Image (cartoon, rainbow, N blue to C red):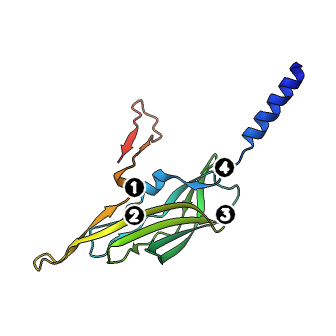
Amino acid sequence: MMKRLFLILFCLTTFTSAERYDPAVSMASFLRMKPQLNNAEPSIADNELDLAFAPEGDFKAQVIYRNGAQVIQLLTAKPSQRFGTMARLKWRRETIPLGTESGPRSIEVLLDGKSVGLLEFTLTKSGGSDPFDPKPSWILGGPWSDLAYFTHPVDDSNQQRSNFHY
């Protein structure tokens, strides 16, 4: 009886530990991506995201920037660092203009044609009609208003701190 119970428990732990999860972009890494809003046309210039449950070996992902339904830029990303099941995706850094009209924007990550992460946000133009200050300002709407995250930098000192980003 004990042998059967041990065998059943062993099989269950083997199957559960072998369970695979679908890859997904970390929301914290999406929240680190913030458009630059201080120009007449907002832009974004980030070039890395963290992927949880990354596939093993070399792989390529696509990072798609959209203004509404229109694709602004499509970039290829590859893993640059790995730690356990996590991989940091990196791509060529360039400043991507997001358009001069108010409306929805998005950044989506595809792996083998399947979406593994989507950051949706809105940009709203205000001002710009003042003849003495014709530059418009931009209001960013999205998950930054509702979500926050903690980081714990690796530090060998005795004053290890956690950082709260909001």
Q: Which residue is mark 4?
A: 21
Q: CA distance from mark 1 to mark 2?
A: 7 Å
Badge 1 or badge 4: first in the primary sequence? 4
Instruction: Identify the residue shown where x is 37% and y is 42%.
Output: 164
Question: Which element type, helix, strand or loop, lies under badge 2?
Answer: strand
Q: CA distance from mark 2 to mark 4?
A: 27 Å
Kindly identify the amino acid type of the residue bearing the numbered disc 4.
Tyr
Kindly identify the amino acid type of the residue bearing the numbered disc 3.
Phe
80 or 62, nearer to the observer: 62
- Closer to the observer: label 4 or label 3? 4
Instruction: Identify the residue shown where x is 30% and y is 67%.
Output: 37
Side (left or right) of 155 relative to 56: left
Q: Which residue is mark 3?
A: 59
Q: CA distance from mark 1 to mark 4?
A: 24 Å
Side (left or right) of 101 relative to 91: left
Is disc 2 in contact with disc 3, using a CB cutoff of under 8 Å? no
Is disc 1 in contact with disc 2, using a CB cutoff of under 8 Å? yes
Instruction: Identify the residue shown where x is 71% and y is 58%.
Output: 57
Position of residue 5 measured from the top left corner of the image (x, y, whole percent): 84, 24
Q: CA distance from mark 1 to mark 3?
A: 28 Å
Kindly identify the amino acid type of the residue bearing the numbered disc 1.
Pro
